[in-house]
Image (tube, helix red, strand yellow):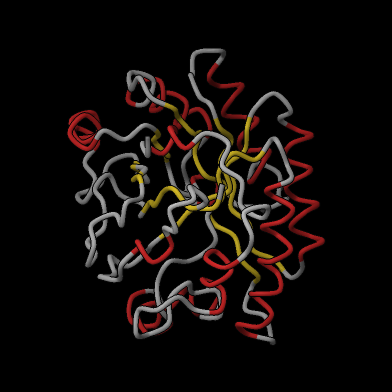
Amino acid sequence: MLDLLTVDGSLYNPGVFNNGNGEVVAIYDYETYAPPSTNGNGGLGFIGMQRCLDCSSSPIAELASRQAAQHWATVFTLNEPDINGISPSQAASWYIQHINPLAIKKALPAVTSSGTSGQGLSWVSQMISACAGRCYFDYINLHWYGTSFAAFKSYVQSAHSKFPNYQLVITEFALQNPAGGQAAQAAFFKQAFAFLDGASYVHLYFPFVATSPALLQANDASAVAYVGTGSCLYNNDGTPSAVGNLMRTTSSTLFQVNDPSDAGYV
């Protein structure tokens, strides 16, 4: 299931990706409140993300009340703790206290694709061990940036091999600033979407990123340096980009919805 990730609170209309066929069903923005837009959620479900242990924009004390008020059916947790100084044991204790009580679908913290010991998938394994059976979760949450579709496919397959009993959600992915710019990103995503839709163990995926080149440059210079602007799903005028159009014009065999109720869509 292909979905939208926005990073800058853009006022673009997410509804341009909602073709009524249930192929794109959800949006998230690293926060526990939905991003502003010209059309609300555009008919899409919103998935809240408690990206930090506690932060001013998404206070942990307000997590449960925001979920209840906005009726999310799924929650994402902690953004890349494996490279941000949060230990697996600290994350496990936090998760048990704050995430377990939510009676909705849950994803473990989103980790990088780093192969360094103690990061990436090994960090997830260590957190699961620290949980000692006390963390209730539905999804392993992955991020990936790299140089080729082959490397992306190998990474996703390796995650499935490591955690065969859990569904995967891939909440950030794109090529790492390819020389071919937007054309290279579009070619990559066309292959990636087809692969992910054929992988029964992948439940949700979010290409990076639902914004425009101008807004990404204005709001996240580090992302521009790392990924470039070729993967943006919008043009600067708010229309779908070449990458965004892949979500709107590809046949329904490319986009398959496993369970849209997880995104609070039905």
User: Which one is nearer the viewer's eye here, 73 or 158?
Assistant: 73
**Residue 164, how many percent across, how many down?**
74, 28
> Image quadrant for the C terminus?
top left
Q: Residue at x 43, y 66 (%)?
A: 210
Task: Specify the quadrant of the image occupied by residue 82.
Answer: top right
Q: Which residue is drawn at 70% across and 59% down?
A: 192
The vertical placement of 252 against 231, above or below, is above
**Residue 118, how many percent across, how many down?**
65, 41
The vertical placement of 22 against 95, above or below, is below
User: Which one is nearer the viewer's eye here, 98 or 175?
Assistant: 175
Relative side of 236 to 124, left or right: left
**Residue 108, how many percent across, how many down?**
51, 33
Residue found at the far top of this picture: 133
The vertical placement of 13 against 54, above or below, is below
Q: Which residue is drawn at 49% across and 74% down?
A: 232
Relative side of 8 to 57, left or right: right
How many numbered discs? 0
Relative side of 61 to 212, left or right: left
Task: Specify the quadrant of the image occupied by residue 120.
Answer: top right
Relative side of 112 to 11, left or right: right
User: Which one is nearer the viewer's eye here, 78 or 155?
Assistant: 155
Q: Residue at x 32, y 67 (%)?
A: 8
**Residue 168, how many percent across, how many down?**
62, 38
